Image (cartoon, helix red, strand yellow):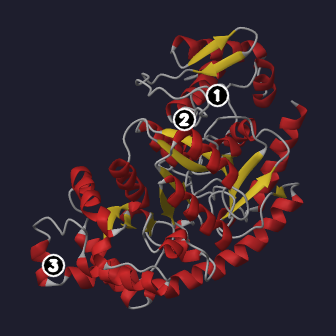
């Protein structure tokens, strides 16, 4: 269901169950839940609605629901827990776990990330999705990118070079253009410190695989990007959630983690934090860097939303001058998600080791797309496109905030950037399941926490929540959840 990352459309059917010659109501209900379980829209450990709630929700006889749940039991998709109900089974074989000190928080299984990632690839039927992690496709359409691809493709030298692997570190032209852009931001980056990647997530993965080994402790912001929690957990790291506030991370918690667990890394979305929209204050950034120096850990700054960020936003990499920090960004949020062009900027001493990790995972990255992107940046087309997106997003945010507040939502952070972090007053996981039946996929608050727990919060995408039809469905389902 969504973050760092993801843009999941609604795969749930909005149609009512109807008896047909081909399928009974029992079979239809069982198949609806089975599909959601297989697609990870109902994650391992999730509780199915009670028999009474499900019967009322779909207008069915309770015996029909019992029969449908029995079918799911027979298929091994759910398990019955005495006096508690039916829960989705975890069908993944557990991997050996690194022993974690008892004082360290235990991350929940990476079920949230699977939900997000799988949800990205389901057809939406053209309906805007409130839980989306990216801008709508029509916002991203441009004429200059196809023109740039045609122009670089017509270059005979590039056509010949396409028959060979590209530069391991990434297209030299793009790295020079990126270095100039970063220097304008105040980040002293040389092209030799830049490595292109298959999106920003790949950049984060390269850094963590290079700097860390299984069992190492990593601090992450909470709420935060579920995919990052799950990715680190899958690598065998100890994930230490740090509460994120309006000015930055909770430094007292970080200090305690440093003393108890000696973390090797802190991963931060310092500008337009996902999901809250918070931006790091200069004072907080300075104190994090002091802590990193004192306790010998590195900082990875994920600047995924840099193109829609406010001017002069504070970045730890700039204050640090790339001494203990790694800077990561990409273009999926502002241009073409499918191109998967990202990059990382590293201290000089680490570039060769990071490059080795990249070569082991992808060899090189596509020179044609990188060179086309370099041309779009160099000619100012990306800058003008980003300005148009920011203006359009400002207008959308105003409308979305008004509709959300009219529907009873309370904003937990000043609305800014792409996402809003709102309190609904009810547990948003059952709310999410009911909204799937209306054809809407939301991003419940539990997805953004390393330790899974019920939450009344949800993240909304300002660009995709201007639809009054969604808010009407939301109010209707909200009332039903409150009555249940």
Between circles 3 and 2, the one closer to the viewer is: 2
In this view, 213 is above or below 160: above
Q: Nearer the viewer, residue 204 or 127?
A: 204
Q: Quadrant of residue 433?
A: top right
> Could you tell whether 484 is left or right of 419 in the image?
right
First of labels 1, 2 by sequence position: 1
**Picture quarter with the N terminus:** top right
First of labels 3, 2 by sequence position: 2
Which residue bears the numbered disc 1? Answer: 46
Q: Does any portion of residue 31 appear in the rendered image?
A: yes
| SS at circle 1 | loop
Q: Marks 1 and 3, Cα distance to the nearest angstrom?
A: 51 Å
Q: Residue furthest top?
A: 82
Q: Residue furthest front?
A: 294
Q: Nearer the viewer, residue 440 or 61?
A: 440
Spot occupied by residue 448 in the image (x, y as percentages of width and height): 63, 46
Spot occupied by residue 234 in the image (x, y as percentages of width and height): 43, 37
Which residue bears the numbered disc 2? Answer: 111
Q: Marks 3 and 2, Cα distance to the nearest angstrom?
A: 43 Å
In this view, 353 is above or below 370: above
> Could you tell whether 338 is left or right of 18 in the image?
left
Which residue bears the numbered disc 3? Answer: 158
Q: Marks 1 and 2, Cα distance to the nearest angstrom?
A: 10 Å
Q: Are marks 1 and 2 in contact (CB under 8 Å)?
A: yes
Residue at point 57%, 33% (across, down): 36
Residue at point 32%, 72% (across, down): 193
Number of numbered callouts drawn: 3
Q: Quadrant of residue 328?
A: bottom left
């Amino acid at each position: 269901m969504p973050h760092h990352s993801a843009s999941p459309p609604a795969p749930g059917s909005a149609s009512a169950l109807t008896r047909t010659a081909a399928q009974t109501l029992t079979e239809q209900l069982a198949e609806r839940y089975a599909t959601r379980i297989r697609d990870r829209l109902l994650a391992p450990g999730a509780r199915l609605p009670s028999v009474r709630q499900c019967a009322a929700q779909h207008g069915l006889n309770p015996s029909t629901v019992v029969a449908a749940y029995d079918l799911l039991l027979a298929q091994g998709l759910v398990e019955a827990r005495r006096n508690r109900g039916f829960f989705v089974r975890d069908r993944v074989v557990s991997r050996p776990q690194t022993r974690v000190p008892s004082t360290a928080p235990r991350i929940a299984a990476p079920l949230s990330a699977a939900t997000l990632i799988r949800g990205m690839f389901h057809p939406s039927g053209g309906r805007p999705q409130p839980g989306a992690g990216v801008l709508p496709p029509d916002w991203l359409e441009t004429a200059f990118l196809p023109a740039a691809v045609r122009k670089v493709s017509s270059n005979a030298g590039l056509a010949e070079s396409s028959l060979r692997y590209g530069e391991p570190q990434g297209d030299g032209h793009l790295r020079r253009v990126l270095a100039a852009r970063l220097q304008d931001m105040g980040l002293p980056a040389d092209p030799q410190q830049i490595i292109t990647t298959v999106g920003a997530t790949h950049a984060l993965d390269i850094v963590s695989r290079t700097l860390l080994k299984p069992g190492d402790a990593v601090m992450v912001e909470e709420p935060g990007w579920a995919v990052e929690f799950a990715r680190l957990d899958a690598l065998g790291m100890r994930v230490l959630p740090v509460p994120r506030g309006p000015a930055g991370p909770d430094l007292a918690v970080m200090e305690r983690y440093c003393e108890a667990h000696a973390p090797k890394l802190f991963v931060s979305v310092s500008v337009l934090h996902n999901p809250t929209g918070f931006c790091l204050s200069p004072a907080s950034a300075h104190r994090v860097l002091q802590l990193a120096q004192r306790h010998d850990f590195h900082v990875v700054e994920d600047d995924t939303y840099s193109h829609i960020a406010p001017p002069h936003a504070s970045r730890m990499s700039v204050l640090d001058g790339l001494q203990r920090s790694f800077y990561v960004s990409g273009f999926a949020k502002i241009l073409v998600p499918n191109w998967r062009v990202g990059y990382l900027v590293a201290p000089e001493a680490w570039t060769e080791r990071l490059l080795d990790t990249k070569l082991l995972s992808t060899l090189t990255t596509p020179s044609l797309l990188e060179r086309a992107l370099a041309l779009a940046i160099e000619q100012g087309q990306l800058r003008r496109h980003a300005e148009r997106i920011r203006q359009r997003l400002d207008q959308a945010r105003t409308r979305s905030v008004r509709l959300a507040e009219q529907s009873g939502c309370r904003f937990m952070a000043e609305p800014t950037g792409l996402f809003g972090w709102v309190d609904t007053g009810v547990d948003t996981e059952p709310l999410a399941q009911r909204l799937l039946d209306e054809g809407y996929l939301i991003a419940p608050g539990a997805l953004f926490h390393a330790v899974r727990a019920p939450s009344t919060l949800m993240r909304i995408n300002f660009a995709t929540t201007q639809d009054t039809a969604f808010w009407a469905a939301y109010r209707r389902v909200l009332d039903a959840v409150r009555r249940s």
